[in-house]
Image: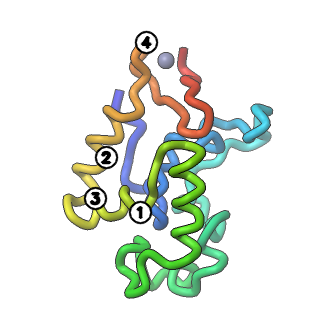
């Protein structure tokens, strides 16, 4: 089901919050969180990774990092490198795709990319788990 994917869940850095372990309501140590995360944008939590280091994002001058003239900045490159290596996902690639093809098309692909082959639920990027099965 694609109902749970939406634009507001795509963070400024290109992360799809829907596939984040925090959104599923768990921590990286696989413990249940008291309050599941509702996504970087909706939570307005000054992004765990980048927003607190970026004036443009914290002042909401830009919606996505690709709107910035220094895109991709050092902070984003660091984050992207970590995700490429550990989780086989790239924020920069995501952002470049969104910039070129629009967020609607991006989300369509994400639905397919993270679909659980068994139940059609969503696979978590951080541990490959489906929390629906
Ligand atoms: Zn499943």
Badge 4: how crowded within 10 Å, few (<14), some, or many (20+)? few
State which quadrant residue 59 falls in: bottom right
**Mark 4 within 8 Å of ligand 1, using the beta carbon:** yes
Location of residue 66 with respect to 104 vertically, above or below: below
Up-down relation of residue 66 to residue 1 (above or below):
below
Q: Residue at x 41, y 78 (%)?
A: 71
Tell me the residue that label 2 is attached to: 107
Left or right of 86: which side holds 122? left
Given contact means CB atoms under 8 Å apart, are the residues at marks 4 and 1 in contact? Answer: no
Q: CA distance from mark 2 to mark 1?
A: 15 Å
Task: Return the residue at label 3.
Answer: 97
Q: How is the model colour-coded?
A: rainbow
Q: Is 37 positioned to the left or the right of 33 in the image? A: left
Place residue 2 in its image quadrant: top left
Residue on which disc 1 sits: 92
Look at discs 3 and 2 and give the one toward the viewer.
3
**Element at badge 2?**
helix
Occupied quadrant, residue 28: top right
Which numbered mark, 2 or 1, is in the foreground of this view?
A: 1
Residue situated furthest left in the rendering: 101
Q: Residue furthest front?
A: 85
CA distance separating discs 3 and 2:
10 Å
> Mark 3 vs mark 2: which is more N-terminal?
3
**Which badge, 2 or 4, is on the more N-terminal residue?**
2
Do labels 3 and 4 touch, CB within 8 Å?
Answer: no
């Amino acid at each position: 089901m694609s109902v749970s994917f939406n634009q507001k869940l795509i963070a400024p850095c290109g992360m799809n919050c829907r596939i984040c372990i925090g959104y599923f309501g768990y921590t990286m140590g696989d413990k249940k969180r008291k309050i599941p995360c509702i996504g970087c944008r909706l939570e307005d939590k000054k992004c765990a990774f980048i927003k607190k280091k970026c004036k443009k994002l914290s002042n909401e001058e830009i919606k996505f990092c690709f709107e910035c003239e220094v895109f991709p900045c050092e902070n984003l490159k660091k984050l992207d490198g970590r995700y490429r290596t550990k989780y086989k996902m790239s924020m920069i690639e995501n952002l470049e795709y969104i910039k070129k093809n629009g967020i609607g098309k991006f989300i369509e692909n994400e639905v397919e990319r993270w679909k659980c082959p068994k139940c059609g639920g969503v696979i978590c990027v951080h541990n490959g788990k489906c929390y629906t099965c």
